[in-house]
Amino acid sequence: MQNIKPKYFLFLVLFLLQIEFINAQDTFTEIGVGIGNIIGNRNARGKGELHFNIIKSYQFGQLGLDMSTGGNFIPGITSIEDENIETLSSNDFKFTTLMVFYRLPIKKHFFIESRFGYSSLFAFVHTDDKTKISRPNFTTGIGIGAHTNNFVLSLRYQYLGVTPNYEGTKNMTIVRSNSESLGLLLFRISYRFDLKYLF
């Protein structure tokens, strides 16, 4: 019997937790967008994301599952070409994440949170019009925020991991991707739905 890959095991555990959250009281979901940029590496195109989470309230705080996907806020790529070598920019890699987070309320409307989980950094390399390169990573993050009525505003730093190594050819051009660390600072705006009114 083959071993289960870690990322599939994580998906299974998080899916089962999600079912538990949906069937529980004091549970809500947030859907929204984020915009920001890469930390420590200039990116004129910026970064954007779509996100969705499910949160359950406890006496000690709130636990949740967060799923997001994103890429360049302004479409396009910024690869570097030198003679017959094209080097892909780590700034252009897209990302998907699946995370568990803990949110600690502060006073009435403010909170801080920590998060960890799985991320994938990927890009399409047009050496044969369909090649996709990706690398799974362990991701961690921290954020602060506030909520008023059904709107949630937050500022979040997320370390997404390392971009993949790759080398291929396109016509007479060598296409390369070098491993580089990628961290984002994103401003998020979300709308909150109470699940007791949906189920």
Image (cartoon, grey):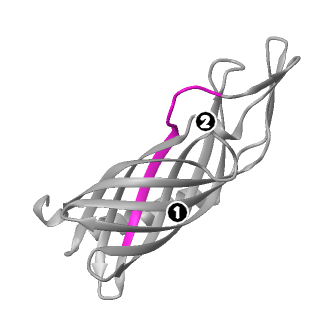
> Which amino acid does the dot numbered 2 rest on?
Ala
Q: Is residue 7 magenta?
A: no
Picture coordinates of residue 68 (x, y %)? 45, 50
Is residue 185 in sight in this rendering? yes
* Quadrant of the snapshot with the C terminus: bottom left
Query: Residue at position x 11%, y 62% from top?
Result: 197
* Quadrant of the snapshot with the N terminus: bottom right
Picture coordinates of residue 29 (x, y %)? 27, 61
Q: Residue 42 versus residue 75: which sits nearer the camera?
A: 42
Most common secondary structure along the magenta stretch: strand
The residue carrying pointer 1 sits among few (fewer than 14), some (14 to 19) or many (20 or more) residues within 10 Å by Cα, namely: some
Going from N to C along the chain, the mark reached first, 2 or 1, is 1
**Location of mark 1 (residue):** 10
Is residue 4 in sight in this rendering? no
Q: Which mark is residue 133?
A: none
Query: Residue at position x 13%, y 58% from top?
Result: 198
> Vertically, is 42 above or below 109?
above
Query: Residue at position x 31%, y 54% from top?
Result: 190
Q: Which mark is residue 44?
A: 2
The picture quadrant where one finds residue 92 is: top right
Alpha-carbon span between mark 2 and mark 1: 34 Å
In the orientation shown, which residue stands out farthest toward the left? 197
Magenta span: 63-77
The residue carrying pointer 2 sits among few (fewer than 14), some (14 to 19) or many (20 or more) residues within 10 Å by Cα, namely: few
